[in-house]
Image (cartoon, rainbow, N blue to C red):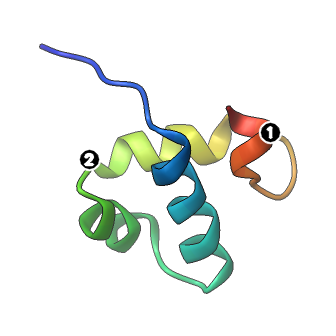
Amino acid sequence: MSYIHLTLEKRSQIEVLRKEGYSIRRIASLIGVHHSSVARELNRVDGEYSAIKAQ
């Protein structure tokens, strides 16, 4: 199994799409990662998600 880190670009996409109300699964589909990766990323930060904070 291989692991990759999310780039700042992908994190920024997650931030924008989440603020627009997209579901975790839809965000994952749009940026090309597994939905659990998006869920874990969103759970990493307390409060509102910020790509800069998550980096």
Q: Position of residue 54 (x, y in %)?
A: 71, 36
Kind of residue at badge 2 = His
For label 1, the SS is: helix
| Of residues 23 and 33, the one drawn nearer to the viewer in this rendering | 33
Dot 1, how many residues are within 10 Å of its Cα: few (below 14), some (14-19), or many (20+)? few
Task: Identify residue for label 2.
Answer: 34
Q: Is residue 25 above or below residue 34?
A: below
At 32% across and 61% down in the image, what residue appears? 31
Residue 21, image quadrant: bottom right
In the rendered structure, the answer to whether residue 54 lies left or right of residue 24 reads right
Q: Is residue 13 above or below residue 39?
A: below
Task: Give the residue at mark 1.
Answer: 53
Instruction: Identify which residue is drawn at 65% across, 41% down.
Output: 43
Q: Position of residue 1 (x, y in %)?
A: 12, 13
In the image, 55 versus 28, the foreground residue is: 55
Specify the farthest residue to the right: 47
**Mark 2 nearby-residue class (10 Å; few <14, some 14–19, many ≥20):** few
Farthest residue to the left: give it. 1
| Structural distance between the alpha carbons of marks 2 and 1 | 21 Å
Q: Amino acid at mark 1?
A: Lys
Q: Nearer the viewer, residue 13 or 26?
A: 13
Residue 1: numbered disc: none
Mark 2 or mark 1, whichever is nearer to me: 1
Q: Is residue 10 left or right of residue 53?
A: left
Residues tagged 2 and 1 counted as in contact (Cβ below 8 A): no
